[in-house]
């Protein structure tokens, strides 16, 4: 049995519901106020997540507004608008002036993937609610031409013989390429891989420099040759494990804990195990200043590289609804592709005020950084795979997400997600704060509200922290994933005052849990080396750790 950290309720019954709390615990935890505690319990600075590192909002006041009706894209005419919209986008791809595509109120029918392949473009509707803009997709991605961008994924699924097996349901079906990839609105950079799966698809790295040294959490690093680097450049910093199963970089990720580490950590030494996309702010000699704090220490044996990172920027999706017809869920990983947005290769971009109904996955992500996804609501009767998923992202902020439908992984940090944040969000059914293996690390669940119905009989416990993912990418997360002001509303089991156990995580090292509260007493079990404060407290003076850290940073400057 692995060692576990346990905190038991001591303050009695709390009054919490899904939208508001009467808990009044105004003191701050020592991890924010006590220097001795801070020195021995590293807490990442999450304030750099989001568009422009949280320092400003997008400004599109000077963008040219294009009324799509002038290009034969008309709402409520019962016709499929896919080809007309793709023709308009193709025309705009040859232009550079920033543009807003303005859609009227009403329904637009689409059945093809709408690729966004240029910077400085916004798809804007007339509102996400009643009387707004609706994009209706009558059939799933299963019926589009298989995208070349997912050829590597398709080969990977075949080579590993990925089969979903559920004997009791008579299911033995191959995984779908749409289970965690693809969407009808899809941002991409031509020629760039969506995600690394197979060494045969490796592309030559546009290496700019090799890093020599740097310290986790600081804003500078030394490189061997800075001649190809300049201020204003967005680069990717990559950390590798060339030392095999006992590699020292694995200690950087997981510490000395005796937890099982999956084979993908050492079987592909050419695969970066941690990546950070960041803006260079200054170059002086061999010393590079960057906008956001370093994700990890830098050591020569980790072959840390600085490379070009191809991306789009200033891409926005706002003020509309995405609707799918109801379709029965077949099985986990066998989704048909009712997927809304697929965001890849974006920097300083955003999604705002979007409703998504009856999706397999509302928003999927891969290789994006400094992006804000805000005011998204997912709903419908269908069992979904993801609501808004974070995979392969860095410094991404999902703010005010409302999950009203049943979702297998309602909030999920997936493979290679780093220093990203779910903030001020709520899950109304079967909640799970999912950490989906694949070296996701230094991520934050911040001011999250969940509604929980406990089993009618048996022990009072709920696996709120259960992690998913494949064994070859275990453990469930690397160091310093954090939880701040997690509030549960239990709907039943009030007949006694026994605390409810919130558990589910045994292999997540060095987690930080501050402010876990509910409308019943709770105790928390989280292994193997969690730091905990404020169990049965809600830190009312600081509802959001992200916002607190951002305010502190802005004040300091």
Image: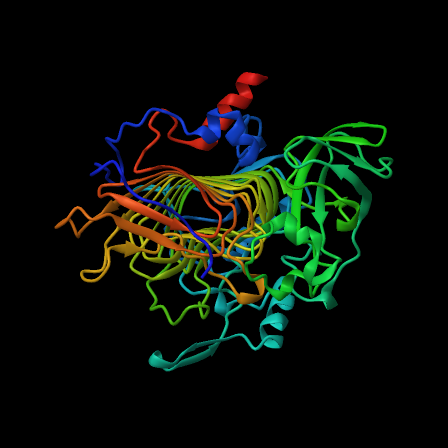
Q: Is residue 514 above or below residue 557?
A: below
Q: Residue furthest left?
A: 495
Residue 82 in picture, x, y percent from top left: 50, 56
Where 511 sits versus 455, above or below?
above
| Residue 352 visible from this viewpoint | no
- Tell whether 289 sits left or right of 447: right
Q: How is the image coloured?
A: rainbow
Position of 12 compared to 472: left or right? left
| 136 or 386, nearer to the observer | 386
Q: Nearer the viewer, residue 395 or 8?
A: 8
In the depicted view, which residue is nearer to us: 513 or 382?
A: 513
Query: Can you give x and y, in whole percent of width and height, for residue 207 in the image?
Result: 81, 47
Residue at 51% x, 31% y is: 37
The x and y percentages for residue 479 are: 55, 47
Which quadrant would residue 472 be assigned to in this image? Answer: bottom right
Where residue 369 appears, x then y in whole percent? 60, 42
Q: Quadrant of residue 28?
A: top left
Q: Image quadrant for the C terminus?
A: top right
Q: Is the residue 240 above or below the residue 124 in the image?
A: below
Q: How many marks?
A: 0
Q: Is residue 433 visible to the viewer in this orientation of the structure?
A: yes
Q: Quadrant of the N terminus?
A: bottom left
User: Residue sitting at 38 percent across and 72 percent down?
Assistant: 330
């Amino acid at each position: 049995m692995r060692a576990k950290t346990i905190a038991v309720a001591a303050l009695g019954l709390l009054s919490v519901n899904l939208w508001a709390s009467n808990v009044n615990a105004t003191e701050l935890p020592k991890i924010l106020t006590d220097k001795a505690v801070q020195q021995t319990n590293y807490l990442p600075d999450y304030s750099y997540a989001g568009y422009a590192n949280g320092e400003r909002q997008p400004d599109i006041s000077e963008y040219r507004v294009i009324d799509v009706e002038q290009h034969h894209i008309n709402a409520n005419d019962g016709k499929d608008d896919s080809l007309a919209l793709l023709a308009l986008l193709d025309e705009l791809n040859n232009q550079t002036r920033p543009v807003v595509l303005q859609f009227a109120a009403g329904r637009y029918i689409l059945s093809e993937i709408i690729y966004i392949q240029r910077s400085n473009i916004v798809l804007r509707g007339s509102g996400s609610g009643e009387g707004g803009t609706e994009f209706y997709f009558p059939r799933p991605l299963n019926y589009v031409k298989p995208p070349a961008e997912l050829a590597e994924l398709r080969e990977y699924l075949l080579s590993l013989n990925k089969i979903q097996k559920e004997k009791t349901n008579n299911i033995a079906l191959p995984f779908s390429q749409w289970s965690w990839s693809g969407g009808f609105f899809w941002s991409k950079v031509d020629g760039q891989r969506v995600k690394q799966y197979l060494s045969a698809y490796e592309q030559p790295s546009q290496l700019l420099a090799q890093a020599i040294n740097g310290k986790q959490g600081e804003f500078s690093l030394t490189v061997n040759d800075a001649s190809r680097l300049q201020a204003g450049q967005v680069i990717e910093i990559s950390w590798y494990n060339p030392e095999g199963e006992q590699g020292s970089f694995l200690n950087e990720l997981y510490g000395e804990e005796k937890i099982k580490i999956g084979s993908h950590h050492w079987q592909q030494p050419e695969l970066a195990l941690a990546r950070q996309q960041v803006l260079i702010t200054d170059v002086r000699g061999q010393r590079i200043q960057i906008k956001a704090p370093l994700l990890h220490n830098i050591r020569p044996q980790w072959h840390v590289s600085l490379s070009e990172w191809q991306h789009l920027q200033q891409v926005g999706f706002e003020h509309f609804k995405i609707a799918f017809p109801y379709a029965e869920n077949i099985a986990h990983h066998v989704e048909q592709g009712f997927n809304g947005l697929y965001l890849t290769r974006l920097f300083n971009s955003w999604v705002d005020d979007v409703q998504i109904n009856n999706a397999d996955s509302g928003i999927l992500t891969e290789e994006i950084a400094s992006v804000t996804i805000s005011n998204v609501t997912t709903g419908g009767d269908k069992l979904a795979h993801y609501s808004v998923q974070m995979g392969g992202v860095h410094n991404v902020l999902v703010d005010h997400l409302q999950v009203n439908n049943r979702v297998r992984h309602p909030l999920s940090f997936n493979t290679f997600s780093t220093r990203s944040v779910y903030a001020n969000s709520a899950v109304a059914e079967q909640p799970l704060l999912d950490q989906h293996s694949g070296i996701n690390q230094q991520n934050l669940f911040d001011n999250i509200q969940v509604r929980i119905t406990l089993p009618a009989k048996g022990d009072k416990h709920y696996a709120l922290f259960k992690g998913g993912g494949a064994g070859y990418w275990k453990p469930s997360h690397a160091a310093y994933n954090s939880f701040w002001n997690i509030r549960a509303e239990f709907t039943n089991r009030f007949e006694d005052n026994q605390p409810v156990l919130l558990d589910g995580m045994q292999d997540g090292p060095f987690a930080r849990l501050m402010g876990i509260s509910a409308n019943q007493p709770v105790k928390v079990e989280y292994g193997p080396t969690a730091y905990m404060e404020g169990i049965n407290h809600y830190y009312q003076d600081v509802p959001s750790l992200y916002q607190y850290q951002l305010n502190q940073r802005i004040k300091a400057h």
